[in-house]
Amino acid sequence: MSKREYDESDVRIRPGRRGSRPRTKQRPDHADAEGAMVTLVDRGRWTCAPDGDSSRPPVTAMRARELGRTPIVVGDRVGLVGDLTGDPDTLARIVRVDPRATVLRRTAEDDDPYERVVVANAQQLVIVTAVADPVPRTGFVDRCLVAAYAGGLSPVLCLTKADLADAEPFAATYRELDFPVVVTRRDQPPTELAALLAGKVSALVGHSGVGKSTLVNALLPGVDRAVGVVSAVGKGRHTTVAALALPLPRTADGRDGWVVDTPGVRSFGLAHVTPDDVPAAFEDLAAAIEDCPRGCGHLGPPADPECALDARVEQGLLRPGRLAALRRVLVALR
């Protein structure tokens, strides 16, 4: 057989599913994208408030292809392009997710490595606990406090249903930690809580049945969030199934406030938190723990006999009650 010479006309190109046009990694910078805040996530669609302005119609958006599987949660600041009118059957695109200032995370259990981001960029975490029906649980409040400190949120303890029982014994447990403790009743408007929420982004978290949706209805008349009841075994039924950011009345100086109503949770895992995350959130304790030995859990003797926080108490630089309250919260990590 004679040797045959081949040229390009002899080569057959099998047509593929993709075109032959060369791909590029260059992506548009979307400099004209308008800022917005995510207020609801529902089945691959994100509801956004342009510029965080509650007076404009909400915009429904999809995630741009170039973002891949970038997680986007309620409270995220994003960049939008496309139809931003908010008219029915219109759809914008989320092309940018800004860095988060704060993050409230939890895991299903303490040994679960998968973190769930509950809300982003919230300034406050309002821990809602009923003083009766269902009975309050310090363990859950302590775990929420740990998550708040670790995520950069300022905690607020809101004790509901004070018309059923005295709230002070439970409130006194947390006075030494120097954060706001608010008591509400079902027969009175939550005036003190409304003042704390004004002009800020605040997330509400608590067990089912403690009154989160009732508080939202009182703060925002006309919203009509579904209200549940507590079962005979003392457990509430879920009435909120997805986190939702709702606009508060604008303050006199033009600040927009938001309250994020989150679904009731039965457990608050802390697999993502270390013992240093909690005292580091307090200005008067952050410097003290730098003198602790490596691996110190800050629980004091006998587990941590050389904890520097005990020395601060002996020197009169730290109130004993404040340290005791802090260590009770740290026990939640164990």
Image: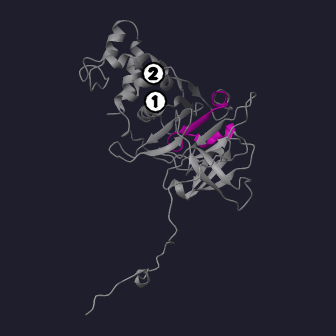
- Quarter holding residue 111: top left
Instruction: Please state the horizontal and vertical placement of residue 102, each as a whole percent of the image.
Output: 51, 35
Which is more N-terminal, label 2 or label 1? 1
226 is higher (above) or lower (below) than 322: below
Q: What element carries label 2?
A: loop
Q: Which residue shows up at 27% across the image and 91% down it? A: 2
Disc number placed over residue 149 in the picture, else none: 1
Q: In the image, is 320 to the left or to the right of 206?
A: left
Task: Check if mark 1's residue and mark 2's residue have beta carbons within 8 Å.
Answer: yes
Q: How crowded is mark 1: few (under 14 residues within 10 Å), some or many (20 or more)?
A: many
Are there few (<14), some (14-19), or many (20+) residues within 10 Å of tag 2? few
Can see residue 277? yes
The CA distance from mark 1 to mark 2 is 8 Å
For the image shown, how many numbered marks are present on the structure?
2
Q: Percent position (x, y) of residue 269?
A: 39, 41
Magenta region: which residues? 194-219
Residue denoted by label 2: 282
Q: In this view, does 7 lie above or below 160?
A: below
Q: Is residue 204 magenta?
A: yes
Query: Left or right: 107 with respect to 64?
Result: left
How is colour applied across the structure in the image? one colour
Position of residue 289 in the picture relative to residue 231 (left or right) = left
Task: Describe the element under mark 1 as helix, strand or loop.
Answer: helix
Foreground residue among 239 and 278: 278
Q: 263 or 7, which is in the foreground?
A: 7
Question: Could you tell me if residue 265 is visible in this image?
Answer: no
The type of residue carrying mark 2 is Phe
